[in-house]
Amino acid sequence: MTIEDARPVVPRRSFIFAPGLKPKMYPKALASGADIVCVELEDGIAPKDKDEARRHTMALFAKPQADDDVERIVRINCLREAFGLADVQAVLATDTPPPALMLPKVRTPDEIVWLDNLLTERGHTTRLHVIIETNAGLEAVHDIARASPRIDALFFGGVDMAAELRCKHAWEPLLYARSRVVHAAASVGIDVVDVPFLDLDDPEGMERDARLALDLGFSGKGSIHPKQIPILNKVFTPDDTQVEKARRVIAAFEEADTGLVVIDGKLIEKPVLREMHRILKIAERIGK
């Protein structure tokens, strides 16, 4: 598959990190039920352990990966830092690169273009997932989202964003920032994933935040522990009513061959089709 191929619609309801320093935890993360497993090389790894974690991580992907519908990503270090450059060099040096890279603290589209060019020159089809967690990144998020056809999703980094904006790390103070990231992702038809909920002892609060994120337009939300994953998957899974409506809307447009249809007395215009196809494909992917 080339980077010019259309982006596939896949479930990105939940993700969890697996520390690159502890490769034995990788299979456990893959079996956690999360749609995305991200091997961590950035904040979760101390500077003294970065080289070892990188070696372990590259070794993980030297082996064939199971066809288990779990999306595999590696979060590298910031491209503006020496550790990030070393991570990129390791990816370029291997013939078995990770399927996707998560890029933290992205500030400008130039970072994405630079990495895309290097991956293309090397012949790697590695996809990209971009975290928007800086004020500069938020300002440039629309240009960042358009910087490469390799980008499959934007991730909202709430903790760092709150620190940069000097606001409380809570839903209301970060609503504008979240909305801007959702807007940018929707403008190019890619997914957008919300920040993990950090209080393991408040599952009701996590579910509340997840439902707010869903209503705002997010495709999924991160987790910090496997016990959060079933709740997130439930929240972001289309229910039977949504799936049936998606089928009816798609069928109606195929039959009418026009830019709008009327279903149950409500006018539905063609731009809605993209979301209907997304709901249906995700439902089919998870066997609903």
Image: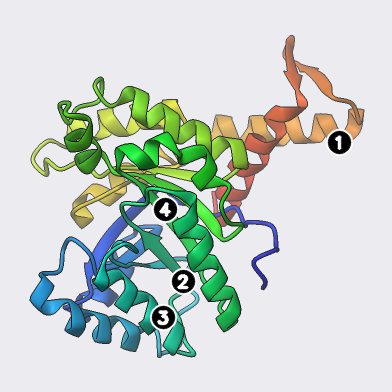
Q: Earlier in the sequence, mark 4 or mark 2?
A: 2
Few, some or many residues within 10 Å of mark 2 (<14, 14–19, 20+): few
Query: Which secondary structure, mark 2?
Result: loop
Q: Is residue 266 above or below residue 113?
A: above
Name the residue carrying label 2: 68
Q: Nearer the viewer, mark 4 or mark 2?
A: 4
Q: Earlier in the sequence, mark 1 or mark 4?
A: 4
* Residue 18 horizontal side relative to residue 221, left or right: left
Which image quarter: residue 176?
Answer: top left
Query: Which secondary structure, mark 4?
Result: strand
The image shows residue 212 at horizontal and vertical percentages of 34, 26
Q: Residue at x 11, y 40 (%)?
A: 199
The answer to whether residue 238 is seen in the rendering is: no
Name the residue carrying label 3: 91
Query: Which secondary structure, mark 1?
Result: helix
- Pick whichever, 148 or 12, lies toward us: 148
Dot 2 amino acid type: Asp
Q: Residue at x 67, y 42 (%)?
A: 277
Name the residue carrying label 1: 254
Query: Which secondary structure, mark 3?
Result: helix
Q: For the residues marked 3 and 4, what is the alpha-carbon distance in whole angstroms?
A: 17 Å
